[in-house]
Amino acid sequence: MNEIEEFRRETRQWLETHCPASMRTPMSEREVVWGGRNGSFPSADAEQWLRVMAERGWTAPSWPTQYGGGGLSAQQSSVLQEELRRLKARPPLYSFGLWMFGPVLLEFGDEQQKQRFLPPIVRGEIRWCQGYSEPGAGSDLASLATRCEDRGDHFLINGQKIWTSYANLADWMFCLVRTDTGKKHGGISFIVFDMRTAGVETRPIRLISGESPFCETFLTDVRVPKDQLIGPLNVQGRRSLAQSATLRTAHRVPRPRRARLGGRRFCGRRPAGHASLAALQGQLHRRWHHRDQSQRHRQAGPGPARCDLRRSVSHVNEFRPANARRERAAILR
């Protein structure tokens, strides 16, 4: 038995022993575990599942062990995911820190920042939100207007972010800010701050369904310590930190297998247009998987191509009609 097959055998045995039976069933949105300072668990089994996975570093299996990760190779990480799927195990933790902020911090953060932020992310102790989009700067990063001024011993931030998912529930925000108004493309920096900081205000954006994960976030004279700047100030160059952060966080958030909208399942039936959208989504997933595996074999990080595919898949899912038949009838009336 070779090394990877031995790892598979040990992983399968460990998962069979430690994954509770209730964590091997379909999950509704209300049962998703986001963690955080004020996070709650839908059950004792969900709390136990997160605890044992975090202790092993398997909430972030490929991150280095010195930051709480599992230290697995790309091949071992792939085996772990295969065994989790075989068991139909629920994700122990949903986290923008795992998917978005962590990879950026691993590449651009200093050692003190990594030690400070990464282990709590692995354990689900901090819930993060993303502060990128603004009323006048959505996909156009160069139009970013939120100001961040150097005030000697701290930064002072003023501006507004919009479509900030779960900002009202988040503990910390990772944020793109303008630190030099004379450099449209190069005067952008990456900074993090506690959402309890004075001057931070969130307002939920209510959609027609009555519910929404989105918020407006207002930043008024927000004082941020200088050691919370990630990477250099006023990043420039073709592969800037701001560009890398945007690409690395262009990540489709995993969804529960039986998501609900307004109390009704919307992925159980096949509405009109489902077949063509499903075909396009399948094609994108195959391209994503092919490029992802190629990068894994080269031991490379997630590049722009992979992130663009993720973004495309996300857009397909966003425009999937929840009930196309009802919408068509309303139009005809």
Image (cartoon, rainbow, N blue to C red):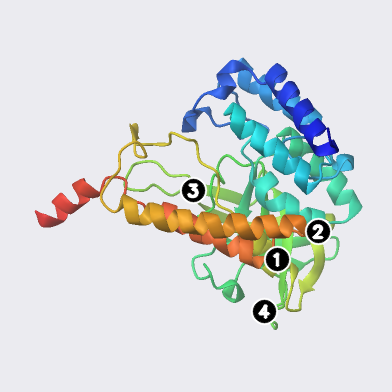
Q: In the rendered image, which residue does mark 4 sit on?
A: 185
| Picture quarter with the N terminus | top right
Whichever of labels 3 and 4 marks the residue nearer the N terminus, that label is 4
- Point 53% across, 69% down: residue: 139
Which quadrant of the view contains residue 24? Answer: top right
Residue toward you, 136 or 125: 125
Three-letter residue code for mark 4: His
Cα gap from disc 4 to disc 1, whole angstroms: 13 Å
Three-letter residue code for mark 2: Glu
Q: Determine the secondary structure under disc 2.
A: helix
- Point 37% across, 39% down: residue: 267
- Where residue 27 appears, x then y in whole percent? 50, 29
Mark 3 surroundings within 10 Å by alpha-carbon count, few (fewer than 14), some (14 through 19), many (20 or more)? some
Three-letter residue code for mark 1: Ser
Cα gap from disc 1 to disc 2, whole angstroms: 10 Å
Mark yes or no: residue 217 visible: yes
**Can you tell which of label 3 and label 1 is closer to the viewer?**
1
Q: In the rendered image, which residue does mark 1 sit on?
A: 244
- Point 57% across, 46% down: residue: 167
Whichever of labels 1 and 2 marks the residue nearer the N terminus, that label is 2
Residue toward you, 306 or 173: 306
Q: Determine the secondary structure under disc 1.
A: helix
Mark 1 surroundings within 10 Å by alpha-carbon count, few (fewer than 14), some (14 through 19), many (20 or more)? some
Q: In the rendered image, which residue does mark 2 sit on?
A: 107
**Can you tell which of label 4 and label 1 is closer to the viewer?**
1
- Where residue 18 appears, x then y in whole percent? 71, 19
Do tag 1 and tag 2 residues touch (Cβ < 8 Å)?
yes
Cα gap from disc 3 to disc 2, whole angstroms: 32 Å
Residue 43 sits above or below residue 57 on the image = above
Q: Determine the secondary structure under disc 4.
A: loop
Mark 2 surroundings within 10 Å by alpha-carbon count, few (fewer than 14), some (14 through 19), many (20 or more)? some
**Can you tell which of label 2 and label 4 is closer to the viewer?**
2
